Image: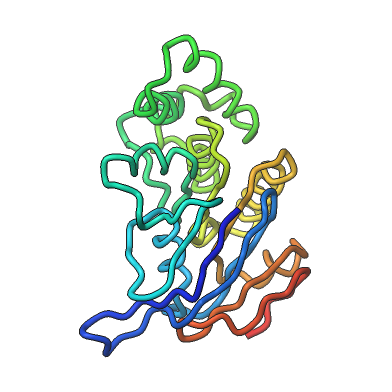
Amino acid sequence: MIYFDNVSKRYSGGRATALEEVSFQVEPKEFVSIVGHSGAGKTTLLKMLIAEDQPTDGRVFFESLDVHSIPRSRLPQYRRKIGTVFQDFKLLPHKTAYENIAFAMEANGRSDDEIAENVPQALGLVDLEDKIWNFPGELSGGEKQRVAIARAIVNQPDIIIADEPTGNLDPIATYEVVQILRKINDLGTTVIMTTHNKGVIDELGRRVITMDDGRVVRDDREGKYVL
C-alpha cells in the first residue's frame, strides 16, 4: 500500500540530513508506530507521505502512485485518501465539535444530507455524542483530540496518520485516544502513528519502526519501545 524506496532528505546544500536511505513498506490495515528521539526524522516521513515535503533522493509510493509525481492540481484529491491528526489538535476555536467536523466534509464537497448523517456517526465512534455542540474551549485535551480524530475519519480515508497524537495529554486521555485509534484500525483503516510514549508502544504490541539520525535502525512486527 505504502512504500518508501531508498528515500533521503537533505537540507542546506546537503549539510543537514533529515532522512538517509529509508526503505520500508506498510500493508493495508496495518497499525505502525514510528518512534525515535526528537529530530530522528519521524515527522519528515509523514510530510513525505502527504507530499508536503519532497525527497532529495528516492521515491514514495501510495499503492502504485509515485506521490511526488502528482500534479499540484491533483494533490487535494490525493490527500483525501489520508486523514491527519496533530499533536495540537488544530480545531477551529469558534466552531462547535459538529461544525469542525462538518467543515472537513464541506471542503471535500459532501452534501448537507451526508454531513448531517456522518458527523454524528463520527462523534459516536470516538464516544463524544454528548459533546456535539460544545466549542473546543469547553472540551478537555483528550476530548479535543477525539474531535480531531473524528474529523480525520469522517471522509472515510484509507489511512490515518497521527503525529504525536498523545503528546499533550495526560495518561488517562492518552489511553482513550490510543484505544480509539486501535478501534479505527480494527475497522480496516491503516494507521501510522509517531510517538515518544514508551507506554503506548509497549501496550499496543503492534509493528514498531525505530528511527535514529534519519535512518531506520529497527523494524519489529510486534515491537517494544527500544532506543
Q: Please, is residue 29 above or below residue 224 in the view? A: above
Where is residue 19, by image quadrant? bottom left
Q: In the rendering, at what x and y percent does residue 66 appear?
A: 44, 56
Q: In the rendering, at what x and y percent does residue 158 appear?
A: 57, 42
Q: In the rendering, at what x and y percent does residue 106 appear?
A: 37, 23
Relative side of 187 to 79, left or right: right
Q: Please, is residue 73 above or below residue 201 in the view? A: above
Looking at the image, which residue is at 60% across and 84% down?
217
Where is residue 17, by image quadrant? bottom left
Q: Residue furthest top?
A: 113
Quadrant where the C terminus lies?
A: bottom right
Looking at the image, which residue is at 36% across and 70% down?
55
Name the foreground residue: 135 vs 11: 11
Name the foreground residue: 222 vs 67: 67
Relative side of 190 to 10, left or right: right
Relative side of 3 to 178, left or right: left
Looking at the image, which residue is at 37% across and 27% down?
103
Name the foreground residue: 71 vs 79: 71
Q: In the rendering, at what x and y percent does residue 127 appear?
A: 64, 33
